[in-house]
Image (cartoon, grey):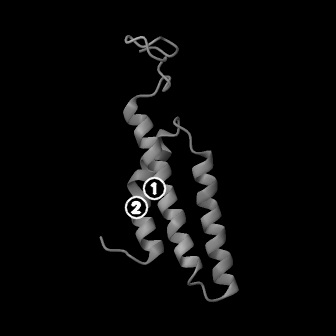
């Protein structure tokens, strides 16, 4: 279906524009995976001992918050990298590297 074209069943136009359902699903999954990394940093924050460790963890967490906020459907390479690399990163950050 072309962007802006009405669905054959009389429903709403295709809200995905030029993106496939799989691309949209990958985008949402990538955002969720980044959320898992952010949560892993949150769990570490509660166990941080020194102020410098806390500051480093907060800075890292904020980097991923920003990355998630700026991620778009057009960032195919970024989405693929997130889906490939970030699950292991979340395990590493949380201290559960059970590969």
Residue 40 locus on image (x, y percent): 50, 70
* Residue under the image location 66 percent in, 68 percent down: 59
User: Residue at point 46% right, 42% down?
Assistant: 27
8 or 93, nearer to the observer? 8
Residue furthest to the left in view is: 99
Q: Sequence order check: which comes first, mark 1 or mark 2?
A: 1
At which x and y percent is residue 47?
Answer: 56, 84
Answer yes or no: do the residues labelled 1 and 2 have beta carbons within 8 Å? Answer: yes
Distance from Cα at disc 1 to Cα at disc 2: 7 Å
Q: How many neighbours does mark 2 have within 10 angstroms: few (below 14), some (14-19), or many (20 or more)? A: some
Residue on which the image places disc 2 = 87
27, above or below 91, in the image: above
Quarter in which the N terminus is drawn = top left
Residue at image coords 47%, 11%: 6
Q: Secondary structure at mark 1?
A: helix
**Residue at (48%, 27%) from the top-left corner?**
16
Measured from the top left, where is residue 71 in percent x and y?
57, 45
The quarter of the rendered structure image containing the C terminus is bottom left
On the image, numbered disc 1 is attached to which residue?
33
């Amino acid at each position: 279906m072309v962007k802006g074209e009405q669905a054959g069943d009389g429903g709403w136009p295709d809200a995905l524009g030029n993106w496939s359902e799989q691309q949209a699903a990958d985008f949402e999954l990538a955002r969720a995976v980044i959320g898992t990394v952010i949560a892993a940093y949150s769990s570490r924050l509660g166990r941080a001992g020194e102020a410098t460790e806390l500051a480093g963890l907060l800075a890292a967490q904020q980097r991923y918050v920003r990355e998630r906020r700026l991620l778009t459907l057009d960032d195919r390479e970024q989405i693929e990298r997130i889906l490939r690399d970030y699950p292991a990163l979340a395990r590493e950050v949380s201290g559960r590297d059970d590969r």
